[in-house]
Image: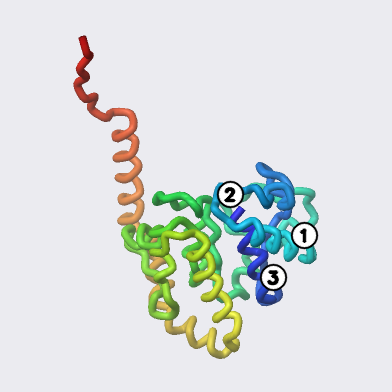
Amino acid sequence: MYRSVFIAELARLNLLEHGHVSYNEVCPENGHYTEFLKDENYVYQYNPNYLNQVKSILDKVDFPLRIDSDRAVSIPNGSQTLSAVPECMESFLHVVTETCFFDQKLHLTEKIFKPIVAKQPFVLLGCANNLQYLKQYGFKTFSGWWDENYDAIADPQTRLQAIINIINDICQRSDKELESMLKEMQSVLDHNYNHFYSNKFLDQAWDELKFNINNVFFRPQLPTSLGT
């Protein structure tokens, strides 16, 4: 649902024309956006009037929005690959739309590592504090160039708007400004790329996997007391 709201906000600010955007108006799980953006959908505490605005904006978008697989009936799941490489290479910012956004948990997937492998700066549309979670693995982010306090915003709607503000600001900058900024970021981009392919990160990920498996399957059982 949050991706639909995100696309509507980009359209409202006329930002879709500033980059390559992939969005399927029909969700494989929830159907067409007109079905799951309903007035009675209070599960994420959206104002029903706002959801009506979102639907009205999406109704005017020229679908489909696709970066690759434009000839396919449906977009194949290629989550393990870095697709649309030419489009990535001509883009400044990678907007990572993570699997989870509304939840209160630390959850990252392969999506966050695609801009790292492509040596691109990125913003993270994910759960609160997940950018900090990424840093705990030893990766660096981009607080030197824009406000990353969005990561600590608990309210999903406010967090989304803070990220949109960053995207809007970047889209207003000239190519010369962005080129200069990219040169300034090069050490961060190189660090992230090298760290991703390092044994240190591999060991961190493996140790965390073993810890989680042990915690789930081999957790010591607490003694129980039955009442009489």
Q: Nearer the viewer, residue 98 or 160?
A: 160
* Applied colour scheme: rainbow
Residue at x 35% of width, y 51% of height:
202
Residue at x 39% of width, y 79% of height:
144
Rendered image quadrant of residue 138:
bottom left
Amino acid carrying label 2: it is Tyr
Q: Secondary structure at mark 1?
A: loop
Q: Secondary structure at mark 2?
A: loop
Amino acid carrying label 1: it is Pro
Is residue 197 among the parts visible in the rendering? no
Amino acid carrying label 3: it is Ala
From the top left corner, tell me how far across and down residue 179 is, in percent. Answer: 53, 85
Do the residues bearing badges 1 and 3 touch, measured as CB atoms within 8 Å? Answer: no
The residue lying furthest to the top in this view is 228
Residue at x 45% of width, y 56% of height:
127
Q: Nearer the viewer, mark 2 or mark 3?
A: 2
Choose the circle earlier in sequence order: 2 or 3.
3
Q: Provide the residue designation for mark 1.
A: 64
Q: Provide the residue designation for mark 3.
A: 11
Left or right of 183, for residue 52: right
Crowd tier of the residue under label 1, counting other residues whose Cα lies within 10 Å: few below 14, some 14–19, many 20 or above: few
Q: CA distance from mark 2 to mark 1?
A: 27 Å
Is 211 located above or below residue 3 in the figure? above
Q: Provide the residue designation for mark 2.
A: 42
Q: CA distance from mark 1 to mark 3?
A: 14 Å
Rendered image quadrant of residue 7:
bottom right
Q: Nearer the viewer, mark 2 or mark 1?
A: 2
Q: CA distance from mark 2 to mark 3?
A: 23 Å
